[in-house]
Image: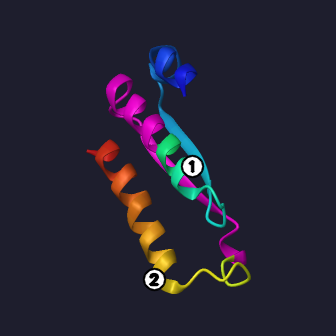
Amino acid sequence: DSYLSNQAKSLFANTDALIYVLDLTSVNFDRDLNYFEKCVGGLRVHSPEASVTILLHKSDLLAANALKPQQVRLREMEIKRCALPSLA
């Protein structure tokens, strides 16, 4: 986390696009989403015109991991909450 904070300008300046992969079955989804949010924040500050693409990894395994549909929707809403401000 400190690397991301300390190097935000060099990581995100003059960036055209951010492609981020989120594992929907992660047991640390909140931590992963927090890291994504920090990346989006750095991008918003240093390259506000950049596009954001989010790949939802392991979405085919959601049923096997016993995530209920409302849990999946909650994760989707959290991802959108983090990502959409960067598109403004």
Residue 24 position in % (x across, y down): 61, 65
Residue 36: x and y in percent read: 50, 44
Residue behind mark 1: 32
Q: Is residue 24 left or right of residue 80?
A: right
Instruction: Give the amino acid at mark 1.
Output: Asp
- Per the image, the residue denoted by label 2 is 70
Give the answer, above or below, for where 88 lies relative to 58: above
Is residue 14 visible in this depiction of the protein? no
Query: Is residue 22 found left or right of 81 in the rendered image?
Result: right
Q: Secondary structure at mark 2?
A: helix
> Magenta residues?
37-61
Q: Is residue 81 shown in magenta?
A: no
- Location of residue 71 in the rendering, given as x and y in whole percent from the top left corner: 49, 77
Kind of residue at badge 2: Gln
> Is the residue under label 2 in contact with that under label 1 (CB below 8 Å)?
no
58 shown above or below 3? below
- The answer to whether 67 appears left or right of 5 in the picture is right
**Quarter of the figure that contains the C terminus:** top left
